[in-house]
Image (tube, rainbow, N blue to C red):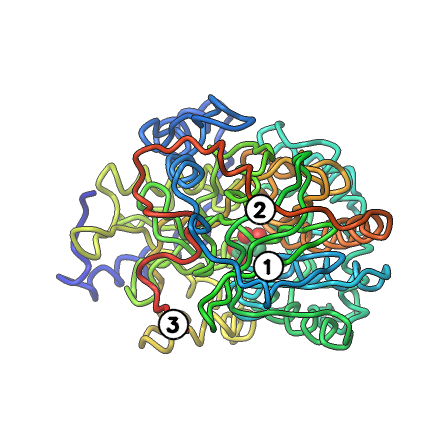
Amino acid sequence: MSGTKLSENIDKRLFEVSNSREKRLQQKIEDADDKTKQEVLRKYHPDYIDDLFTQLNSGVNKGKRVVKEFAELVSSRSIVENAKIDQSASFDTDVLIVGGGGAGITAAIFAHDAGAEVTLVTKLRLGDSNTIMAQGGLQVSIGRDDSPIIHFKDSMKGGGNVNDAELLRILVENGPKSVAWLERIGVILNKDENDDFALKKGGGASRNRLVYAKDYTGLEITRNLINELTKREGIKVIEFSPVAELLTDKNGNCTGAVVIDYDNDHFFNVRAKTTILATGGSGRLHIGGFPSSNHFGSTGDGMVNAYRAGAEVVDMDSFQYHPTGVVFPSQMLGLLVTEAIRSEGGHLVNALGERFVNETQTRDFVAASIIKECREGRGIAVDDKYTGVWLDIPALDIANGGDFVRKRFPAMFRQFKRFGWDIRKKPVLVFPTLHYQNGGLKVDRYGETAVKNLYAVGETVGGIHGRNRLMGNSLLELFVFGEIVGLNAAERANNIDLGEVSTEHLKSIKYIKSQYSSSPLLLPDYIRKDF
Ligand code: MEZ
């Protein structure tokens, strides 16, 4: 990508942004029409780069278009091949939950309260997940001018009208109830002067619908979820213990999982009546070489395990590139600058000091528009590899007066400050970052996959958001479906017996040439693994 090198003349580059600010603050940019949108998406959005995709060579979705990384992972050697199971460490449970983020913890709480014996295993520490990193908030139709129907319509339109309508209906209808639950367990969300929720508008939404805790919504929620979980003594939590493979019986039903104990370096079986996958997304597979805003554990493990056991996937060729990932300072590469900055009026500005897109359109289009600017030479190059456009955050203090940026975005302010960058005074350089997997496991309205007794919840599930999720709908999904899946998995577990355990289903893997020596990946190769 071409552009003017940032290091050569940073003061001049920054001056171009401040110099054009006053004029830009008066400017109104209309939404692009559908034809223009489609053209820009097709030419610049990574979902349309054919080289990034291939077809699955086996399993229920054989022949389906998916990203190469997923196809290679499901067709690589399993890490349990030749593994010796430590039977003395193996045990039984009613409901096994895999994953310690927002979806897993919520499901554990509800399954436990429904009377099941619950075990939660998680790859790293409890809470280490994309949930805790969530900034902008969750969408819920509680404004006076809003309703679940309007929320539904916005989400459908944003998703390209291919969302699973039944799952989306459940999401929007249960939103207010889930947010009331979050408040009950202690989550403190921003309120206005009348003590009503302060509501913001996310990209692609027609109403102010985002509830939030400043710019650390996920941290505030996770803190309370962990408190709530630890109050329940009966829930067994095992940290630093990822699932290597699922276990199945001779009918193909799920009967638990093979777990790795990272601390003691051995494998053990958890035999479970029902299993819930809450393993998150796959940003750390770095599709298309993009940096990622995701947690290091987001390597798509649950999807790989479930597909091998016979579950179906949907839209595994559709990913969300959040428009504003950091490209400078380089220590923050890929990290998120919340969309809330744009919804509050932050401008995207090219090397000519111009705005080039209405910043509050849907993420797929805004991301593609940034890629277009950079490809066409109107980006600002950091070095030979990374180019970006400015996100003019200081414009918010000018438009709103006072100390708006520091008060509204304290976490972001502090993050940049660590690297000597004051976002009240300087714009930040951004480029799309791999943020979310729109697709994932196909589930029914109870959260059950095509494999009996195997449930899934959260980002590992596909369909709800169609091919482009709206901001804040994923955080909401964790609590709406965490409850549903927890309750249903517990009810099933209360009515069935434990099954026999085997990994026979792995015999159907058809190996292909793969960049991975074994799968699931569990952790990207650049992270420290000294636990
Ligand atoms: O839902 C999201 O992805 C979100 C709220 C992100 C953000 O920009 O803050």
Q: Residue at x 19, y 59 (%)?
A: 6
- Which residue is under mark 3? 416
Q: CA distance from mark 2 to mark 1?
A: 10 Å
User: Which dot, 1 or 3, sits closer to the camera?
Assistant: 1
Under mark 3, the amino acid is Phe
If you read the primary sequence from the N terminus, does the residue marked by circle 2 or circle 1 appear first?
1
Q: Quadrant of ligand 1?
A: bottom right
Q: Callout 2, which amino acid?
A: Thr
Query: Would you say the beta carbon of the disc 2 residue lies within 8 angstroms of ligand 1?
Result: no
Q: Residue at x 50, y 58 (%)?
A: 338
- Considering depth in this image, is 72 or 354 the residue closer to the camera? 72
Q: Quadrant of residue 158?
A: top right
Q: Secondary structure at mark 1?
A: loop
Identified at 56% across, 70% down, the residue is: 239
Tell me the distance, in whole angstroms, between the alpha carbons under discs 2 and 3: 30 Å
Q: Secondary structure at mark 2?
A: helix
Asked if the beta carbon under badge 1 is closer than 8 A to the nearest atom of ligand 1, the reply is no
Q: Which residue is mark 1?
A: 99
Q: Amino acid at mark 1?
A: Gly
Where does residue 279 sit, x and y in percent of width and height? Answer: 57, 53
Q: CA distance from mark 1 to mark 3?
A: 30 Å
Question: Which residue does the numbered mark 2 point to in the structure image?
Answer: 460
> Of callouts 1 and 3, which one flags the residue occurring earlier in the amino acid sequence?
1
In this view, the residue in front, 418 or 131, is 131
Label 2 or label 3, whichever comes before in sequence order: 3
* Residue 145 horizontal side relative to residue 222, left or right: right
Q: Quadrant of the C terminus?
A: bottom left
Q: Is mark 1 in CB contact (under 8 Å) with mark 3?
A: no
Residue 3: give x, y in percent of width and height: 19, 47
